[in-house]
Amino acid sequence: MKANAVNLIEKEWILPGNRTCPGCALSLAYRHTLKALEGQCIVTVPASCATVLHGMYPITAVNVPCVNTPFASTGASATGLVAGLKALGRKGITVLAFAGDGGTHDIGIQSLSGAAERQIDFIYICYDNEGYMNTGNQRSGSTPLGAVSGTTPVLGKQQYQKDMTAIMEAHGLPFVATCSASYPLDLYEKVKKAKTIEGTRFIHIHTPCPPGWIFPFSDTIKFGEMAVETGLVVLYEVEDGIFRLTSASESIARKGGNLQPVREYFTSQGRFKTITEEQIDELQEWVNARWKQCLHRATNL
Amino acid sequence: MGTRDCNHICDESSPGIGEAGKTGEWRTHLPIIDDKKCTASKLNKPTCFLCWLYCPEAVMTKGIPPSIDLEYCKGCGICAQVCPVQAITMIAEEKNIG
Amino acid sequence: MAIQRKSNMLIIDGNQAAAIAAKMSRVQVVAAYPITPQTPLTEQLSLFVEQGELKAEYVAVESEHSAMAVCTSASIVGARAFTATSSHGLAYMHEMLHWAAGARLPIVLACVNRAIGAPWNVLNDQQDSISQRDTGWIQIYCRNNQEIMDTIIQAYRIAEQVHVPVMVCYDGYILSHTEMPVDVPEQADVDRYLPPYKPHTSLDPADPKNYNLVTLANPRIGVDGKLCHGYMELRYLLQEALQNSRETILQAGREFNDIFGRDYEHMFWEDRNDDAEITIVAMGSLAMEAIVAADMLREEGIKVGVLGLRVFRPFPKSDVVQALRKSKLIVVFDKNISYGSEGATCSEIKSALYGTYINASVRNFIVGLGGRDIKARELVEATKKAIASLKETVINPDYPEWICQI
């Protein structure tokens, strides 16, 4: 039976009264990730907004065992947990690495790539709020073209986002997927599927950030949906090399493949206040080209 | 009194609700559910629950009607946004008026 | 009581001794990245694992930073973890060394001492491990390959008792690549000496704990209403653990002697220091060279003794003071330099002596950096130079002398 809001497990592993900002998509994504794993996991978290969510000693706001690890070391920390559990003969526990885009695309890419190449048996989730939000919004390898940040303060970022999921797919992983916090059931299903697969599994989750992107707290879901409807974020999974569009991206493709124009997504967020018409046109072309590739690759249409 | 009796030799934390305090105090707007509009309440059966699904704080329960733990609800207003029948309205907290 | 035991003497180099010691300590997770001169140790351990001689997870990581991250996470889950590195590898681990000690994880690391660049140099000095002095690790230095073997086994006993990681340091090439006779213990004896690791941490979904969260400066009350430490208290506990580890180190040495017949109930080694007026202080294999120098000086009628430092952290201040109480001149040879100051062991000796009744002069020589050969004859000449300098002044000079050709 497919998961829906009614039949989804009620037990929570994220506890109320934590330190995330109101409307935090990371919190929502993490909540459903832990539901999919039913808490039967050991988590490793590098310095990130998730560290803030987890709380301050001696109290934690999550009901799962966790080790915090320095920024660059998430993939290696997960490796250590897997190796330790294996050496001790402990079975049935999923190791989950949960890192932001800074910890994944930038400072953590070496240890993640190393672990993926070694095919270590764990799920790596990158929640992507497209910047160093924990330190107050500076550019990351995943900040979009045109976005203003603490380190792109006047001109906005001049480069495109790094396609981390493609990089991870190139490692020959058994399962990579993209998700959005605005589609929690799709996320839930993908994490649940990842749980049953052996080897390094990589899941990328788009997590809109109200204070960093500069939009009202209540609009988190709306901006996540807009990103998917415009094709800026495409929901898919690649299992053993088989590419499938999922959820809303699959529906859009099935209904003729017409994406919404990207313009409103950019003009309605404060971080794009300096984006130029040329940049928006450029991004639209980029989206169109990538969507064409996705439609071409999809095996389930 | 010192911390010698704490017995931790390293930083070991245990789960607790309200780690950041009563986060309901952060709220500027209060969510009010209109039972007459709420689908689950109207049909008097477990259905919809999108407000519960999308709540980032895990402060909602899948009851009929759904309920919100106001001690910890930060008042983001996502529930009001995702409700397909606009059964939830966000009203300004009195403490913030004037 | 006479100890009846079989001798199993092998002619092996220091890296082989370290690998065999790690195997006999039944390490469960090994994570290492090759670096000269540690590489043969890493290769030997992977061979042990692939041949089934060592039942452990061998992780061929992509960097030393990751090696230590694998060790910290494996250790926190409850596995006995081992790694080894040198030089830049140890420097690259720096952040994780702090993390391991801060999380109180009993990891053992073999540091095959090598110089640090720039410029590149693969030969021996002790700048690498000395640069990690303040990371909260216990540091033990070895004089020969037998000590490497024995110290790694003892290191797990010590680390797991005091919950502090231990760095076992030995000189690159001089020990790592030089074969000498080593008495390899029986596995059953090692098992008797070293019980399985009982972790102080627990990672269990049934009783979830979260390790190393953000910690406030001040104490905070936990969910059970108990006042828990602040950051400062946790740091104090690490310092306290190192301060108190002397007893554990000595006990581990004593009990090692009981089983294996080799005495390690010392924080440092002494040679003819009882009647010495001059004491040469050195650390690692250099202390062996100092014994030869002392022989030569004694032949000339100069009463010289040697103090070979073994445990550098915790630094055995009172023991050192006791050992140096009769010395009029202390000549410290350092294979490291704290730029702008002096050799690290010299600073420790001076600090230990300050405020005691001992009013010896201290002379510091920087030697052997980047593998520069240091002969006993040079130690003799330096010691004579130090003796001669007393005629000019007994006051300690601000900076050390270097034995080099500048």
Image: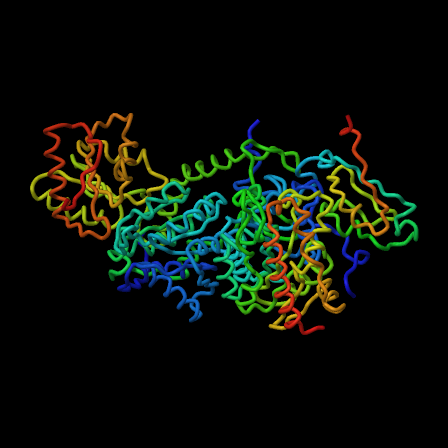
**Residue A221 coordinates in the image, percent (x, y):** 72, 51
Q: Residue at x 41, y 41 (%)?
A: C245
Q: Nearer the viewer, residue C243 or C403?
A: C403
**In the displayed structure image, the side of residue A171 where residue C258 appears, left or right:** left
**In the displayed structure image, the side of residue C298 where residue A17 appears, left or right:** right
Q: Nearer the viewer, residue A124 or C330?
A: A124
The mark total stands at 0
Q: Nearer the viewer, residue C144 or A274?
A: A274
Q: Nearer the viewer, residue C359 or C33?
A: C33
Residue A59 seen in this snapshot: yes
Question: Which quadrant holds residue C320?
Answer: top left
Residue C78 seen in this snapshot: no
Q: Residue furthest front?
A: A277
- Please tell me whether residue A183 is drawn above or below residue C253 in the rendered image: below
**Residue C160 coordinates in the image, percent (x, y):** 46, 48
The quadrant of the picture occupied by the C terminus of chain C is top left
Question: Which quadrant holds residue B22?
Answer: top right
Q: Residue at x 37, y 49 (%)?
A: C91
**Residue C312 coordinates in the image, percent (x, y):** 33, 42
The type of colouring in the image is rainbow
**Residue A269 coordinates in the image, percent (x, y):** 66, 46
Q: Residue furthest left?
A: C300
**In the displayed structure image, the side of residue C256 where residue A162 appears, left or right:** right
Q: Residue at x 28, y 64 (%)?
A: C10
- Please tell me whether residue C231 is drawn above or below residue A142 in the rendered image: above
